[in-house]
Image: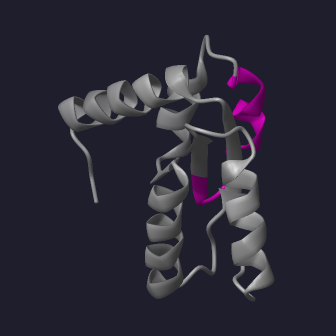
Amino acid sequence: MALNLQDKQAIVAEVSEVAKGALSAVVADSRGVTVDKMTELRKAGREAGVYMRVVRNTLLRRVVEGTQFECLKDTFVGPTLIAYSMEHPGAAARLFKRVRESECKI
């Protein structure tokens, strides 16, 4: 789906605000994740205080510029899912570990 400039700016603004308040971030390759698994992951993330978003890599690079997560920008290759822990620093990592143990390809 093609995004116009205003949509891209809105995404960057939204995710940038989240990044500023996040305690930690985890990046994963979302290739091979089914819609059902992604829905489960997002639901579990909301319950754990984890903000997740699939964002184009070029936009994600703009989001992390000037933040504590700028060191991650070289990892944005392919279909990227980023998860920000908002309440506990290890929440996103634990969530991804749990999902991975349930035979998901994340």
Percent position of residue 82, x then y: 59, 48
Please indicate, yes or no, whether residue 51 appears anywhere in the rendered image: yes
Taking depth in this image into account, of 51 and 8 the one nearest to the observer is 51
Magenta span: 69-81
Taking depth in this image into account, of 50 and 47 the one nearest to the observer is 47
- Residue under the image location 41 percent in, 23 percent down: 17
- Residue under the image location 52 percent in, 68 percent down: 44
Taking depth in this image into account, of 78 and 30 the one nearest to the observer is 30
- Residue under the image location 48 percent in, 60 percent down: 47
Q: Quadrant of residue 57?
A: top right
Please indicate, yes or no, whether residue 77 appears anywhere in the rendered image: no
Q: Quadrant of residue 103?
A: bottom right
Q: Quadrant of the N terminus?
A: bottom left
Percent position of residue 75, x then y: 76, 43
- Residue under the image location 70 percent in, 46 percent down: 26
Q: How is the image coloured?
A: one colour
Q: Is 35 left or right of 7, judged from the image as shown?
A: right
Percent position of residue 64, x then y: 59, 24
- Up-down relation of residue 76 to residue 29 (above or below): above
Taking depth in this image into account, of 102 and 54 the one nearest to the observer is 102
Percent position of residue 101, x then y: 80, 81
Q: Quadrant of residue 28?
A: bottom right
